[in-house]
Amino acid sequence: MSDTRLRDATQHAEKLVRDEKLELPIDLIALAKSRDILVEAKAEGAKGVSGMLLRVGNNFSIGYATHIKSTGFQRFSIAHELGHYFLPGHPEHVFSGGNVVHESHAGFGSGDQVELEADHFAAGLLMPSYLFKAEAGKYSDGFTAIEKMAERCETSLTASAIRYAELTDAAIAVVISTGSSVNYCFASLAMRGIRGYKHPLKGSVLPRESLTRTFNQKESNIITAQREDDSTDLIAWFRADDEIDACEEVIGLGDYGKTLTIITADLPDQDEEVDDMTERPPRFK
Ligand SMILES: [Zn+2]
């Protein structure tokens, strides 16, 4: 598993956005059309397949799944397939041995390197860092910014939350869960830097007293996309060395059948901390 290749995949997409002078929300259909790629919605297909890339001779087409009725999910699926088209080596790989159809499992749940590269391409294409950061900076840290970015980029809350965690300076973690267990977790650099931080592994148990765990016990919370928040602390979630207050915001993901939790640490303002240090030059003259 290569992190460099994943980063390269994101950057490849961002370069494409720059070169083509695309703006938010990225028009995927127009991009596909510019390369003569046909994009079509598919009737309910095999469970778990998010989309497919087909090749006949030198003609490509994309089919995307519609069993999850979320524009964000469908756009991510299309962007993932575009990744298999644009990323160096991908067409050769997915169509090796005379294959004419590649079926995808988009959404960061796959352990397959090629699938993950296409996911990272999709994130970079739909949420290019330079456009994303400029926009996200307008909102307060945490769920508010994530929600606004999902609207702006026409992406799912989950994809926006993961991208936000990648790009923010704030200490936040994104946890996707089902029942009492963690499906996966993404944490920002600042969160991972907190003393004693332990990353929750796939399949680990949610903190016993957490709002998320209680929330998940009632299925209707997830199906009807209920939303709750509460205060928590980083010892409970990440076994941090020190007691650090945090906010836990929880939302049910509807059809997706999972729950999204955003943990935002309430760290002392870094500027204030620096103010205590005498060697710091005054910020304003
Ligand atoms: Zn794929």
Image (cartoon, helix red, strand yellow):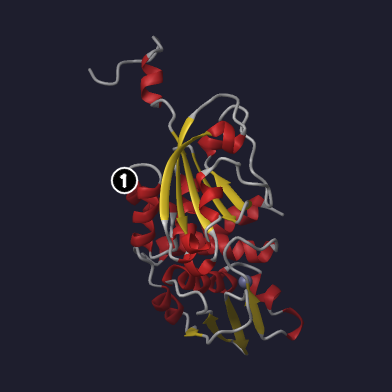
Whole-percent x and y of residue 28? 42, 73
Query: Can you name the residue that lies furthest to the bottom here?
Result: 56
- Image quarter hosting the N terminus: bottom right
Query: Can you name the residue that lies furthest to the left here?
Result: 285
* Quadrant of the rendered image containing residue 71: bottom left
Amino acid identity at mark 1: Tyr
Count of labels shown? 1
Q: Nearer the viewer, residue 280 or 229?
A: 229
Q: Nearer the viewer, residue 153 or 117?
A: 153
Residue at 33% across, 42% down: 140
Rendering quadrant holding ligand 1 = bottom right
Per the image, the residue denoted by label 1 is 139
Position of 153 relative to 184 (above/below): below
Whole-percent x and y of residue 229? 42, 45
* Quadrant of the rendered image containing residue 19: bottom left
Q: Is residue 105 left or right of residue 62?
A: right
Secondary structure beneath dot 1 equals loop
Q: Is residue 146 left or right of residue 163?
A: left
Position of 111 relative to 163 (above/below): below
Whole-percent x and y of residue 77? 52, 72
